């Protein structure tokens, strides 16, 4: 396709995106009104200003993409805003106080999203700073362990308090480490994929190439042991193993990584009471109903209450589920929006993953490819970890549900992640000469 | 790398497919099981946190109602509705309370369906208005009069005891109040822990405030029981108005060494009217012992002693004569003592009011009831209580005789002091001073009175019992202490119940 100053394909993509963003805005606005009608039998207070700011916010995000990444996939932003909108409605329905805070974070998140698009004009430029990102990522990840500013909440030491602001630096560390690993592996993939010994039919890489795997494992162990953040630990490890696998195209890494994970999980199970607890309540929450199993059982009751079509927004009783506004927000969606609504949320995540991986496949730049895979894996696996925990597919490990859970750090980090994905998507479109520049 | 990325996509898709399968398990497959799980109280909370109709007195005062809480007043429980008892302690013993974790009592318990609007009749009425979101709740209308009830509360003051006012012709309860009582608002709180603490405190409080003493407790009746002894004697043809008893201050019952004395060790005797009026003990002791266990026990049983009172409230108590024929056969002395309401005979205050009402009603004992009717939200009458006869313990002739005897008590007997009703209306009464202490101990006694009016065409009956918990009450008699309370209540009740 020939480059032109105003590519019809770019126009079509942005037009589709605008249409879908407006649809997401409409769904969010309607859900917001319905939730208030359901809960209080009255229209929400200041519904006009809410709808206007919702529309302005989403259209701003769209204009950001139109200005700085006009060749990008038209699906990523609308899917994220839909999840964000439904999540916000649920948070607002659960707590008036949190709704205000989350609205502020939504503004910041969209601003950061646009900032990422503005700053990262050429994704490959990030390669130059890969060791800066490594340093930044490790620092951010270890920040909560610094005495004085780091603190524990809900059992995990993942919080940092600087002045009036509390945040979870780990949410941003994920992005930094994904950038570093994508860069490192893009350069080293040839070396890493050359063979070592074959053991039992599986070709293992050479000893020195174990190093990055061991580093990843080490970071995961630190996160698990020192910060007691099982979910993030699992997420990191999966991210590194997946990137290694994709970069080297060698299933050996997957097998080896899986083995290390099982070993780590086994050791953790035997060493830490809180890990054992998670397993115990996963297998049998009923006998721990009055203690640690209460949350998961209430979550199941919530899903059951919802049935196919849900109780209706504002008409269920999700507040009885502990941490329903963050880790367990999916249970609230299952209760009030039913199987239909919950399936729509699952589908939205699947579509985001699909769009992300399609972006990875379309670009021919190894760094962009690996970065797109890394970012998509972070999003997709993090959502899977918490959804699987809530649904009792896996033992529960507390991480936020991207775009939906209450929490500023998570929302901002995920919008930045989205910005990077969209930047890669635009960059590949440019390289394919689908759009100009 | 693209080949691997596609595999990754398939892998992640498989993960999400797994989530979808599990979602179906919880929301469809195991839905019914999870909802029926005993640990799952979502359904019961929803039923609890719903509109509920009011309980209203016969004069239209709301004693229990459900209000929708203003949004800013909602508590952490997340409930939308709050049950309120605007009259606080006044009707606690009748309305009861309504809680989530500790159930409901009294009318709140028995008429829960009507109040919540879930009786089949109410649901039928609501069928046509499925889409109008019509209030389905029902209303319970009591027979009790709020002014009369307030008067009972005020008259008892801080004294422990009960006052019951009945419509003699129907059995409708016009007032029923007991001290100590409690404020149901302190129990019907949303926080289950707070409700539990409040209930436990009340359960352990002295005087059992949670129990409606007027119909859920029984006490030694003292001389008011002489009405039953006299009735038994009259019915058996064993005594008549012409019967006479010697003037004596001590009598030794058969096979015993402990003589029986009159109240205050006085010398007392004379004809039927005189011994009844002056409430001599010895004549009734002799009467009881002479009639023997068989006649006495069966005579008393005719009044429903030993049976749960048939009031339309849960957990009513039963009065007791304190023994059966066999128990008294070898102990006529005990039977003699029971003849004047001492020993182990115990009567429920409501039952004593029913005794007075039966004499007033020509020997017909009506079933007492507190609920006059139940109404659907649109005013349709769902149920209406029609008066029912419980039993006929005495003939109209015996009733007439007892009426005369009780008029004597009010006119010139032990209640002469205190029962002059407004407008010169004649009352009929029997007093009682139930001695709780053993001989030689500090005096401790319950003060009783049962009465009805007007004597010639009775409409209302009353029973007042003041518990002998302190020296002040124990020093008085039923006539002087309980009499004035009965007078005030009778005066007011006669205005409430038309001729």
Image (tube, coloured by chain):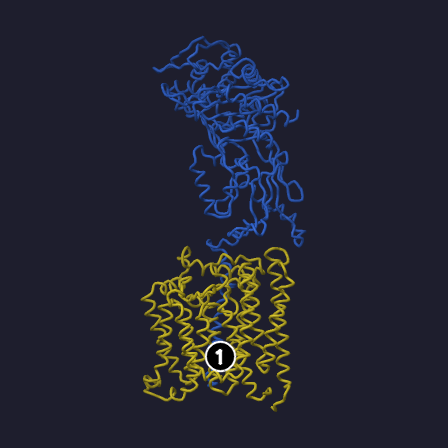
Q: Where is residue B379 drawn, in percent x and y?
A: 67, 42
Q: Depth check: A402 or A143 in front?
A: A143
> Does A213 sit above or below residue A41?
below
Is residue B74 placed above or below B344 in the rendered structure? below
User: Around disc 1, counting alpha carbons within 10 Å, would you say few (fewer than 14), some (14 to 19), or many (20 or more)?
Assistant: many
Please tell me whether mark 1 sits on a helix, a strand or a loop. Answer: helix
Q: Toward the viewer: B244 or A56?
A: A56
Percent position of residue A217, x then y = 36, 76
Residue drawn at point x = 40 percent, y = 77 percent: A135
Q: In the visual, does A90 lie left or right of A273?
A: right
Between A413 and A401, the one lying in front of the other is A413
* Left or right: B487 as drawn, with respect to B261: right
User: Chain B, which colour?
Assistant: blue
Label 1, on which residue? B9
Residue most extreme to the bottom: A2
Residue A302 spot, x, y in % from top left = 51, 60
Residue at 51% over, 76% down: A353
The chain containing the residue under callout 1 comes to B
Chain A: its colour in the image is yellow
State the image coordinates of residue A51 (x, y, percent, origin top left): 63, 65
On-image quarter of the C terminus of chain B: top right
**Nearer to us in this view, B446 or A382:** A382
Residue A178 occupies which quadrant of the picture?
Answer: bottom left
- The mark tally for this picture is 1
């Amino acid at each position: 396709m020939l480059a032109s100053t105003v590519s019809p394909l770019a126009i079509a993509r942005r037009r589709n995106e605008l249409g879908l963003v407006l649809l997401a805005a409409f769904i969010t606005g309607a859900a917001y009104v319905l939730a208030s009608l359901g809960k209080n039998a009255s229209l929400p207070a200041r519904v006009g200003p809410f709808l206007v700011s919702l529309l302005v916010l989403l259209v701003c995000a769209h204009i950001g993409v139109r200005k700085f990444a006009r060749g990008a996939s038209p699906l990523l932003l609308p899917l994220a805003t839909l999840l964000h909108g439904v999540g916000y409605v649920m948070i607002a329905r659960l707590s008036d106080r949190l709704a205000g805070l989350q609205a502020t974070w939504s503004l910041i998140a969209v601003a950061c999203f646009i900032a990422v698009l503005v700053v990262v004009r050429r994704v490959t430029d990030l390669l130059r700073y890969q060791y800066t990102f490594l340093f930044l990522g490790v620092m951010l990840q270890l920040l909560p362990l610094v005495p004085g500013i780091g603190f524990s909440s809900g059992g995990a030491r993942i919080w940092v308090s600087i002045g009036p602001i509390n945040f979870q630096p780990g949410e941003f560390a994920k992005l930094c480490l994904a950038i570093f690993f994508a860069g490192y592996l893009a350069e080293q993939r040839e070396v890493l994929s050359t063979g070592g010994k074959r053991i039992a039919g599986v070709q293992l890489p050479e000893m020195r190439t174990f190093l990055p795997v061991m580093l990843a494992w080490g970071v995961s162990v630190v996160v698990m042991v020192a910060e007691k953040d099982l979910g993030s630990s699992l997420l990191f490890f999966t991210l590194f193993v997946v990137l290694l696998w994709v970069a080297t195209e060698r299933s050996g890494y997957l097998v080896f990584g899986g083995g290390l994970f099982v070993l780590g999980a086994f050791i953790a199970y035997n060493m830490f009471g809180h890990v054992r607890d998670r397993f115990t309540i996963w297998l049998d929450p009923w006998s721990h109903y009055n203690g640690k199993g209460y949350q998961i059982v209430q979550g199941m009751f919530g899903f059951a209450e919802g049935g196919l079509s849900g109780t209706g927004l504002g008409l269920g009783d999700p507040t009885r589920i502990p941490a329903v506004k963050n880790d367990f927000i999916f249970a609230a969606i299952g209760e009030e929006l039913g199987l239909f609504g919950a399936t729509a949320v699952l589908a939205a995540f699947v579509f985001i993953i699909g769009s992300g991986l399609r972006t990875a496949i379309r670009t021919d730049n190894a760094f962009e490819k690996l970065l797109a895979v890394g970012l998509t894996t972070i999003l997709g696996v993090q959502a899977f970890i918490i959804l699987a925990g809530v649904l009792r597919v896996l033992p529960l490990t507390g991480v936020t549900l991207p775009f939906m859970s209450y929490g500023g750090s998570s929302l901002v980090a995920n919008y930045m992640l989205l910005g990077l994905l969209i930047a890669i998507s635009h960059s590949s479109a440019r390289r394919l000469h689908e759009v100009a520049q | 790398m693209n080949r691997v990325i596609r595999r990754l996509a398939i892998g992640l898709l498989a993960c999400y497919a797994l989530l979808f399968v599990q979602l179906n398990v919880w929301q469809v497959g195991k839905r019914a099981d999870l909802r029926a799980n005993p640990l799952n109280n979502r359904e019961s909370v929803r039923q609890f946190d719903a509109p509920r109709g009011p309980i209203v007195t016969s004069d239209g005062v709301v004693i229990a109602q459900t209000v929708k809480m203003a949004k800013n007043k909602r508590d952490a429980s997340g409930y939308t509705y709050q049950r309120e008892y605007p009259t606080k302690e006044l009707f606690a013993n009748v309305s009861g309370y309504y809680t989530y974790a500790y159930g409901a009592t009294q009318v709140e318990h028995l008429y829960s369906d009507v109040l919540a609007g879930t009786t089949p009749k109410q649901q039928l009425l609501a069928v046509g208005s499925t889409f109008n979101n019509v209030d389905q709740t029902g209303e319970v209308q009591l027979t009790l009069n709020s002014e009369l009830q307030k008067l009972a509360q005020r008259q008892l003051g801080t004294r422990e005891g009960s006052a019951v006012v009945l419509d003699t012709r129907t059995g409708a309860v016009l007032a029923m109040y007991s001290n100590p009582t409690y404020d149901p608002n302190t129990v019907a709180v949303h926080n289950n822990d707070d409700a539990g603490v409040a209930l436990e405190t009340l359960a352990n409080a002295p005087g059992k405030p949670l129990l409606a003493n007027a119909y859920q407790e029984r006490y030694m009746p003292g001389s008011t029981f002489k009405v039953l002894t006299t009735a038994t004697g009259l019915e058996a043809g064993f005594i008549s108005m012409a019967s006479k008893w010697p003037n004596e201050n001590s009598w030794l019952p058969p096979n015993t060494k402990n003589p029986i004395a009159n109240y205050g060790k006085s010398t007392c005797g004379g004809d039927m009217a005189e011994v009844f009026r002056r409430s001599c003990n010895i004549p009734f002791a002799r009467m009881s012992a002479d009639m023997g266990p068989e006649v006495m026990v069966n005579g008393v049983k005719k009044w429903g002693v030993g049976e749960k009172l048939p009031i339309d409230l849960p957990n009513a108590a039963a009065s007791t004569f304190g023994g059966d024929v066999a128990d008294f056969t070898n102990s006529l002395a005990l039977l003699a003592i029971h003849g004047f309401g001492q020993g182990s005979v115990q009567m429920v205050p409501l039952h004593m009011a029913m005794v007075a009402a039966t004499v007033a009603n020509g020997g017909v004992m009506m079933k007492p009831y507190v609920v006059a009717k139940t109404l659907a939200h649109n005013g349709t009458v769902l149920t209406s209580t029609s008066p029912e006869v419980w039993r006929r313990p005495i003939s109209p002739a015996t009733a007439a005789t007892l009426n005369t005897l009780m008029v004597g008590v009010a006119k010139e007997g032990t209640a002469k002091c205190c029962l002059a009703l407004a407008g010169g209306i004649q009352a009929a009464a029997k007093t009682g001073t139930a001695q709780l202490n053993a001989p030689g101990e500090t005096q401790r006694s319950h003060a009783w009175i049962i009465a009805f009016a007007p004597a010639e065409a009775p409409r209302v009956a009353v029973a007042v019992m003041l518990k002998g918990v302190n020296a002040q009450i124990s020093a008085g008699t039923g006539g002087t202490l309980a009499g004035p309370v009965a007078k005030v209540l009778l005066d007011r009740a006669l205005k409430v119940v038309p001729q």
